[in-house]
Amino acid sequence: MLSLLHIENIAVIERSEISFDSGFNVLTGETGAGKSIVIDAISAILGERAYRDMIRTGAQRASVRGVFTDVPEFPWFQENGVSYDPETIIQRDIYLDGKNVCRVNGCLVTVSILHRLGVLLMDIHGQHDSASLIDEANHLKFLDDFAENQHFREDYAQKYAEVTKLRSDIQRITMDEGEKLRRMEMLRYQIAEIEKAQLQSGEDEQLEERRKVLQNAEKLADGIANACDCLYGSDDTDGASALLSQAVREISKLSRYTDTFQSMQERLTDLMYQVQDVADEIHSARGDLSYSDRELDRIEERLDVIHKLRRKYGTSCAEILAYLEKAKNELDDIEFADEHLEKLKSALIKAEDAAWESARVLRNNRHKASQSLTERILTELAQLDMPKVQFSCEFTELELTANGADAVAFYMSANAGEALKPMSKVASGGELARIMLAMKNVLAEQDQVATLIFDEVDTGVSGRAAQKVAEKLRSVARNKQVLCVTHLPQIAAMGDTHMLISKFEQSGRTYTTVTPLDKEGRKRELARIIGCTVITETTLKSAEEMLIASS
């Protein structure tokens, strides 16, 4: 769970440290006080997008640090080379130049890698989730998540990939006669051109290395000759080899009188032998160095042939030869297209049969799960004061697609006697908020995320429905840590921990603070929510009664 959140220079929050407890944590405050900023800060350490516009005016960087406790040892840690600690610390620094620096337990990670950890730690549900819920394009995923269909989806995806590949291969070799003849003529020309050159893999690299030697042959010869003179000696001077031999002889004489020079003699002797070996190698290299202008011309001509082929078929001899093999295979496919086409069609029939079998298994599991999902959502909605709502998963059978052979849409009827219709056409804002909460609660049972964040999901909810939403959130908080940004007193009163987010001005600058509330502070904040700006004895009394009732 998220135990501590430290924020620096995020929008109007200059510096704030917030401690969260297990259970139900509520955050309240006036509109514009900065509640969404806290959620943005949490999103940042979960690997969501962060912008330099988030940085407080006048600051060079913004920073968010989160301390998570009781973190399971996810495979993510080993996969990304991050040391595991059940108390995991995530920090993200955002700079004005757009640079982001992310660390997990002190180890640098990229934003995308951080995001993969973030989805394991927390799940944020905001107002936009209602729009996601309405969009029928997401309904199949909701159902598959509930059904835990990942294994069936992966099995189907492999089989469908084989179907699409075979269909593509069939389309590629199915062409009219004129197109077929033109392509065969082109391929034969290309094959003949490459084969005529009789290339060898790596030949271009060898030729370029030899050309480099020949172009610098005189410099190489002069350098080798000078090196030989230095080591062997010349008419005017002794070489290093002779001088070292002389030094060994002199030191060996001294060794007769004292052991002090024995070690020096041995080291000089080794050095002498090493110099003689190197001298012999250099002398041998001089003997191997042969060149001629005719050889250089032949190499230039050969490289010119290779260069022309490079411009058409690849950047190296290896790539050109790979293209040659590919062209031969394509020519064979076209020349024997009828025979090959029959084999592909036969393979496609088998692949489609296998994909359909997998799709039917997936479909059956979806139908079975849809019944359970419907029952669970209706139970949740009844607890959220929507006992008359009808809900169903409507299936449409399709041909094979990337997601199987089904389309799924959620239908509902909000009022008794009304026919089931697509959710987007019948649900009001308040109803959608409760439906979303019901679905999220059902789906949350399937995952291991320890913390759920609800960001103003109570929009459009009031009265008795608000009380039911509050009770449901508290129920969820019995098994998971819940953080909830709310404007409703019914929800705020249910919290185990209550944070007040407030804004003030000082010296022409705006500041936001986050303050944990005691019992008296909670009572005044609830009174403010109930009575807006006017806090009366009546609203204070109502607030106190709400706290007593929810305790």
Image (cartoon, grey):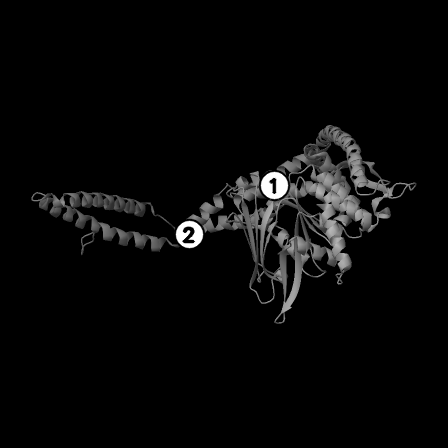
359 vs 59, nearest the viewer: 59
- Using the image, tell me which numbered label, if any, was put on residue 488: none
Of circles 1 and 2, the one toward us is 2
Decide if residue 178 is in sight here. Answer: no
Residue found farthest to the right: 417
In the rendered image, residue 193, in percent from the top left (x then y), is placed at: 59, 44
In the rendered image, residue 72, in percent from the top left (x then y), is placed at: 57, 39
Q: Amino acid at mark 1?
A: Ile
State yes or no: discs 1 and 2 in contact (Cβ < 8 Å).
no
In the rendered image, residue 301, in percent from the top left (x then y), is placed at: 49, 50
Residue at numbered disc 1: 191
Of the 4 image quadrants, the one containing the C terminus is top right
Q: Of marks 1 and 2, which one's residue comes earlier in the chain?
A: 1
Q: Residue at x 11, y 48 (%)?
A: 250
Decide if residue 95 is in sight here. Answer: yes
Mark 1 surroundings within 10 Å by alpha-carbon count, few (fewer than 14), some (14 through 19), many (20 or more): some
Q: Which image quadrant for residue 192?
A: top right
Figure check: 488 above or below 379: below
